[in-house]
Image (cartoon, helix red, strand yellow):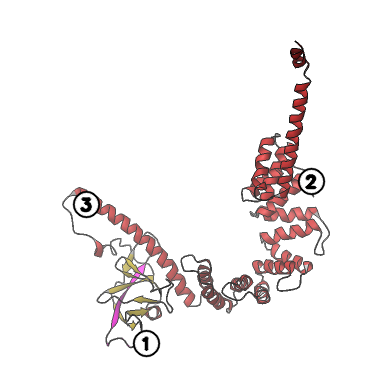
Amino acid sequence: MQQPDPPQGLMQAFRSVCQTHSLTSTAFTDPKNRVIHIDCHLDPVTQEAFVLWDDIQQVFDDALYICDRTRVVPFLKGSDFKTLEPHRIAAVPDVVLDVIVDGQLDNNIDMLMDAERPPPFSSPSEQEVTKEKQDVAAQNTIASLTTGQHITRIITRASRGDEKAQIALGDMYWKGKELCQDYQKAMDWYMKAAEQGHPTAQRRIGSLYKGGLGVTQDYTTAMAWYRKAADQGEAGAQNNIAQFYKNGQGAAKDDVQAVLWFRRAAEQGHMVAQFNLGIFYSRGEGGLEQDYTEAKLWYHKAAVQGEEHAQCNLAVMYHDGQGVSPDYARALEWYLRAANKGIDDAEFGIGVLYYNGQGVAQDYEKAVERFTKVAEKGHLKAKEWLKVEEERQRVLLEEKRKKEAFDPIRANVWLY
């Protein structure tokens, strides 16, 4: 449907306003105070006038967002509350809108608030109430400006070809933070950066294909995008390729290739790859000889970065004396770190230490508490140890009954 032409002479007035980089500072008008008029368009459905964001950016190079006095003018949205494409704002007749641009001028704290000041009050108490309301309004305005400025700045830079901004905008659409979740738009922005050769964008596209988010799930295509990024040294993509070889996704299962790619990522400090490389060494798989010393080395590299599964596995090695002399104190330390992140095997390990009195005072009650916590979530070994404890309690009770039954003192009492 062809869009109708706006009435002749329908234009929106704008003026340039500079914004400092301080979040608490306000905006300042262009010293020349020039007013620019930009043509409006009509929405074919609502017949309401609007101005295209692209048209505004053609005039104001560093435009961040639009203000009508202290109110941020948002992009128009559809019935689904998603921002309309191309981006646009509603026209405001007979008003000069402020185009906030990236720049710095001398501080002038009163500029934006002048137009909104209420008439003076004769009562001091009324003045205090008014000032309090103004303070709250100003704080709300700053919060709105901050959010609006952040999003608009990213959109502006992304539209101009900034790769990092394109990826950031894609992330916002993917996660649904600050913008409505839209996998297709995320893909569109990632693709713009990927076409410029950015490895992070290439990896993101691979992950969308892997998860079937906004596209049909396709491991082969995902692998192809991961490879583009991995060949540029992108550690996350290298780790993902290794996972694909390990699981037989997008390629035939190949543990040797998995180890090769895990090592490439691990040597760059990728903690998940370091953890997985440790697993291959501990099991002696993927063309590697079983080597607990190497396994411990890679687990430790990942554990100190906060990888909770590596922390738990490292604790097990200290507990069982694999690749190192048994050290129950260190085992407890690493178990606790992993348990605090929700790792059930770590909770179980702590229970075993308490049950056996290894590195801590023996405490069956604390052990049972740990076992029960994870047994309720289906941990099989914890359930087995709870049965062991039940048997221990049964034996103790039986011994107590036998002792009481054959107590000489009690026997003498009954005789008399």
Above or below for 115 versus 293: below
Quadrant hosting residue 118: bottom left
Q: Is residue 203 above or below residue 386?
A: below
Residue 324 position, x and y percent, is 78, 47
The answer to the question of whether label 2 and label 1 lie on touching residues, with beta carbons closer than 8 A, is no
From the viewer's side, name the closer residue of 227 and 99: 227
Mark 3 is surrounded, within 10 Å at the Cα level, by few (under 14), some (14 to 19) or many (20 or more) other residues, namely: few
* Magenta segment includes 48: no
Q: Position of residue 341 (x, y in %)?
A: 61, 51
Left or right: where 330 falls relative to 155: right
Give how far apart the Cα atoms at labels 3 and 1 are: 51 Å
Residue with the mark numbered 3? 127
Q: Secondary structure under badge 2?
A: loop
Q: Amino acid at mark 1?
A: Gln
Q: Is residue 287 above or below residue 158?
A: above
**Total numbered badges shown on the rendered structure:** 3
Element under label 3? helix
Is 307 or 177 nearer to us in this picture? 177
User: Residue flagged by tag 3: what amino acid is it?
Assistant: Gln
| Badge 2 density bin: few <14, some 14–19, many ≥20, Cα 10 Å | some
Q: Which residue is mark 2?
A: 321
Counting residues from the start of the chain, the first of labels 3 and 1 encountered is 1
Q: Which stretch did the figure color magenta?
A: 1-19
Q: Residues within 10 Å of mark 1 (few under 14, many from 20)?
A: few
Secondary-structure class at tag 1: loop
Q: Nearer the viewer, residue 89 or 61?
A: 89
Residue 3, numbered label? 1
Q: Quadrant of residue 207?
A: bottom right
